[in-house]
Image (cartoon, grey):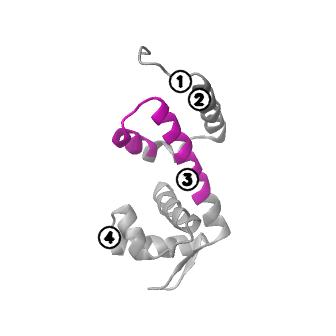
Amino acid sequence: MQKFEDYLEEMYELYLKSELITSKEIVKRLGVSRSSVSQMLRKLKKENYIDFKPYGKITLLEKGIKIGKKISETHEVLELLFEKLRIDKTTALNDIHGLEHFLSEGTLERIKKLNKHLDKFPLNDDTN
């Protein structure tokens, strides 16, 4: 499921920007081969996450939008937290790409509350 979600997250980001979703763009964004993208697109279509025609545009369906949005929002919440914790960007992104697929809704809500708390009471340089 994690790979499905990676693809849907990238497609959702393109969808939000009203950009054309193409296999070429997915190859570029995910750094995977064209054949890997083609295989995944067929799987996503079979599971009704997307619709597409070979060499044509890709359309996110309601089910795909829902998953893409959830992963994208989780990514943003974690990125905010890691920024507030002053974790370097490379490490943060690597960690986020692992965590964003496994957090429960309850945990995500608690992290959102923690982010709000850290807005009011940021960590200082003396914090260990």
- The one of 104 and 77 positioned closer to us in this rendering: 77
Percent from the top left, x then y, of residue 11? Answer: 51, 66
* Labels 2, 3: front one: 2
Q: CA distance from mark 1 to mark 4?
A: 42 Å
Q: Earlier in the sequence, mark 2 or mark 4?
A: 4
* Labels 1, 3: front one: 1
Q: CA distance from mark 2 to mark 4?
A: 41 Å
Residue type at numbered disc 1: Pro
Q: Which residue is at a point 51% across and 81% down the rendered structure image?
A: 57
Residue 60 appears in the figure = yes
- The one of 60 and 76 positioned closer to us in this rendering: 76
Say which element carries label 2: helix
For the residues labelled 2 and 3, say whether their Cβ atoms are less than 8 Å apart: no
Quarter holding residue 92: top left
Q: For the magenta stretch, what is the residue range?
A: 68-96
The tag on residue 122 is: 1
- Residue 52: say if magenta: no
Q: Residues within 10 Å of mark 1 (few under 14, many from 20)?
A: few
Q: Which residue is mark 4?
A: 33
Q: CA distance from mark 1 to mark 3?
A: 24 Å
